[in-house]
């Protein structure tokens, strides 16, 4: 079983932990370290362990690493100066462990680390809001290689593609695979 360490602080971290609890992945065991107690509705599980501790403490982190071997570490914290401290303490403990870090203030842009994956919260939110503009194709996030295998395009009322048969729309480098109309999935043919 692979162990995942989650250093959690704040509302985003709390929501992330709730998602982990509700969508447990097989063969993963989670060790979640909070800086204070949160009220969480948690199903009893052997694959999720909680601990209330100061994650900025090098000795505290070292003792957690002495108990278990971890595949990845997620650092999701509100206070970026504390997240930085946790990150540097992690690197003192293990130079090659994979760290996924939520950066909410672009605080980690200057760090070069091949084993650090930074999730830029500002960029992520701005792109997510942008996806709601009309005529913007939305790339599916959990399908294929995330390179545009599946896209969603909202066809607004005044579009040149509105009220046309699928067969009359040239589909050279792409295909219309499905149509959502009134929250129902339609599998189109050329006469649709």
Image (cartoon, grey):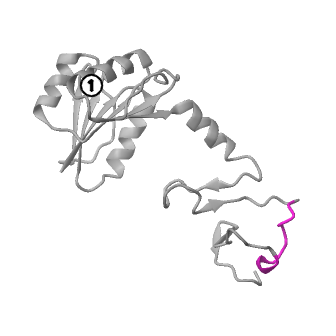
Depth check: give the residue in front, 62 or 48: 62
Residue density around tag 1, few if under 14, some if 14–19, many if 20 or more, within 10 Å: many
Specify whether 106 is left or right of 111.
right
The quadrant where residue 172 appears:
bottom right
Q: Position of residue 191 (x, y in %)?
A: 77, 84
- From this view, report whether residue 104 is shown above or below residue 145: above
Depth check: give the residue in front, 67 or 175: 175
Count of numbered circles in the view: 1
The quadrant where residue 94 appears:
top left
Magenta span main SS: loop
The residue located at (50%, 26%) in the rendering is: 104
Q: Position of residue 126 (x, y in %)?
A: 63, 36
- Which residue is at the far left? 67
Specify whether 89 is left or right of 79.
left
Answer whether residue 162 is magenta in the image: yes
Q: Position of residue 75 (x, y in %)?
A: 36, 30
Numbered disc 1: secondary structure: helix
**Quadrant holding the C terminus:** bottom right
Depth check: give the residue in front, 115 or 44: 115
The residue located at (70%, 83%) in the rendering is: 189
Answer whether residue 95 is magenta in the image: no
Specify whether 70 is left or right of 115.
left
The residue located at (34%, 45%) in the rendering is: 20
Region rendered in magenta: 159-168
- From this view, report whether residue 147 is shown above or below residue 15: below
Q: Position of residue 154 (x, y in %)?
A: 73, 58
Q: Label 1, on which residue?
A: 90
């Amino acid at each position: 079983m692979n162990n995942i360490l989650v250093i959690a602080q704040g509302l985003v971290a709390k929501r992330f932990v709730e998602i982990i609890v509700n969508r447990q992945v097989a063969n993963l065991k989670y060790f979640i370290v909070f800086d204070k107690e949160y009220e969480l509705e948690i199903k009893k599980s052997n694959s999720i362990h909680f601990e209330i501790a100061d994650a900025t403490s090098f000795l505290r982190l070292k003792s957690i690493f002495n108990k278990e071997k971890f595949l990845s570490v997620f650092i999701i914290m509100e206070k970026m100066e504390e997240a930085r401290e946790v990150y540097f303490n992690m690197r003192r403990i293990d130079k090659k462990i994979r760290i996924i870090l939520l950066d909410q203030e672009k605080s980690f842009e200057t760090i070069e680390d091949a084993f650090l994956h930074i999730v830029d919260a500002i960029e992520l939110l701005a792109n997510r809001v942008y996806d709601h503009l009309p005529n913007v194709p939305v790339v599916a996030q959990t399908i294929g290689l995330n390179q545009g295998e599946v896209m969603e395009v909202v066809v607004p009322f005044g579009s040149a593609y509105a009220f046309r048969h699928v067969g009359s729309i040239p589909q050279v480098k792409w295909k219309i695979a499905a149509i959502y109309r009134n929250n129902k999935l339609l599998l189109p043919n050329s006469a649709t």
